Amino acid sequence: MKIASFSVFILFSFQFVFAQSSTLFNSEAVLDLDDRSNIQLYLGGMTGSKTLTNQFGKNFFIGSKLDKDLINNQYRKLENNNQLCYIVPAYLRFNLYNSNFKYFNSLRLEFASMYYNDITFDKNLFGLYFLGNKPFLNTTLGISATSTNYTYHVLKLGSAYRKGIFEVKYNLGLVSGQNLATNEIVNSRVTTSGLGESIDLNLNYQSTHLTNGLNKSNLFNGIGVALDLGLSLKYANGNFVSLEINDFGKIYWDNTISRTSLDTHYIFEGVEVAGFFDSLYFDIGSSENLRDKFISRKNLSQHQTILPYSINIFAHYHWKNKKIYSNINCRVYPESFFVGSVDVETYYKYNKHINAGVIIGTGWNQMIYGGVGLHGYIGRSNIYFIRFNSMVNAFYNNSPLGPVGELRYVRILK
């Protein structure tokens, strides 16, 4: 029986993930949508790792063969502790405005999806998985890794209160939890002795997950609430600064959640592992014996998850030349190993249909990134918005894995 059947190399279970909905103020400011009823459709893709390269990521994701030179090159670039975060935001939003109301003049309805994956792993685990145990003869390797994946969807209803230069926007959302999976390997070690034909494995592994994987298709494995709250201070010429919190809340999971624990010490004789955790077999009898001897499972009657919420600061400034404006974006995730990002973008308005800009920032586990943005009108009632934060990182093979892109389509209703 393969060890992958209960543990698996958790750090490379890469998934596309949908993140929290966009901020409350940014899109309206950038696209000049204040007091205009509209429908918005948004999709983004974000990833970040300062040690995994684009070349390795592309070959791994698309299923191409990973040759030994590529693996060795990637292995040399890794640090003792490595991280990968992968997020893809998506939402559909309706903004309805009514100028007859003095203060409460808007109604907002939004459906957003959140698939979030955050992974940490050490260099040793990567080496064992891709290179096997042969390169590590007579060596004891400590191994550790964690992965956290949430899948949930939110239906939000919100409004705004405006008085003078101040505006408050808020959403209250009903959360449906679809999937939860956390995995952790801690205080574990692997020793290969002799000629590589004896492996001493000391493994401590814990996982919290759906009791039945088929329930991933169920939108209501958990239920919760989420709150968005933002405050904006507006100045002349459309300039403003905003502070907000998004997706602050909890999910209360039902009894589909269970916890699996494994704490074992075992010696394998006469084995040679070509791909550790993929090719390792236990010579102890049936899978039932393995389960009874090493693995314990417990259904959780109650389990809560704090949503990976974000705190956002956004500033929008028009320069004296009305054709130039800049934005400052700062986003922090307090409940995530992934910290966040800060970037500055400056746009030039060529005409109504073309506004082009450059972006420079830091974050997403990258020292620095640079990109471009483009938006404008198509006809009178349609707006497009394209933003690529990391153009260099997206196309240069040896750069850190980290392309970040956003697409938004807006239909003006009136």
Image (cartoon, grey):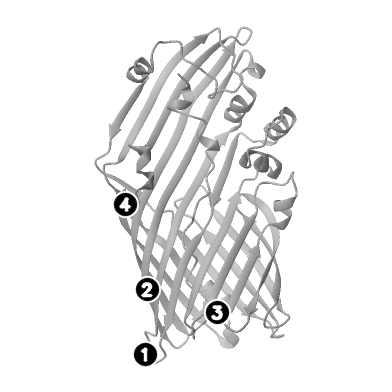
- Label 1 – label 4 distance at C-alpha: 37 Å
- The disc label shown at residue 240, or none: 3
Residue at 47% from the left image edge and 30% from the top image edge? 185
Q: CB of mark 1 within 8 Å of CB of mark 4?
A: no
Tell which residue pokes out farthest to the left in this image: 301
- N-terminal of the pair, mark 1 or mark 4, is 1
Q: Is residue 125 left or right of residue 55?
A: left
Q: Tell me: residue 355, above or below residue 73.
A: below
- Label 4 – label 2 distance at C-alpha: 22 Å
Q: Is residue 63 left or right of residue 286?
A: right
Q: Say which of marks 3 and 4 sits in front.
A: 4
Q: State the image coordinates of residue 302 (x, y, percent, origin top left).
A: 26, 43
Q: CB of mark 3 within 8 Å of CB of mark 4?
A: no
- N-terminal of the pair, mark 2 or mark 1, is 1
- The disc label shown at residue 158, or none: 2
> Residue 286 appears in which quarter of the rendering?
top left
Q: Say which of marks 1 and 4 sits in front.
A: 4
- The disc label shown at residue 101, or none: 1
Q: Is residue 35 left or right of residue 346?
A: left
Residue at 37% from the left image edge and 67% from the top image edge? 156
- N-terminal of the pair, mark 3 or mark 2, is 2
**How would you rate the neighbour count of disc 4 (Cα within 10 Å): few for under 14, some for 14-19, many for 20 or more?**
some
The residue labelled by disc 4 is 220
Q: CB of mark 2 within 8 Å of CB of mark 1?
A: no
Q: Tell me: residue 140, above or below residue 173.
A: above
Q: Secondary structure at mark 4?
A: loop
Under mark 1, the amino acid is Phe
Q: Secondary structure at mark 3?
A: strand
**How would you rate the neighbour count of disc 3 (Cα within 10 Å): few for under 14, some for 14-19, many for 20 or more?**
many
Q: State the image coordinates of residue 28 (x, y, percent, origin top left).
A: 53, 77
- Label 3 – label 2 distance at C-alpha: 21 Å
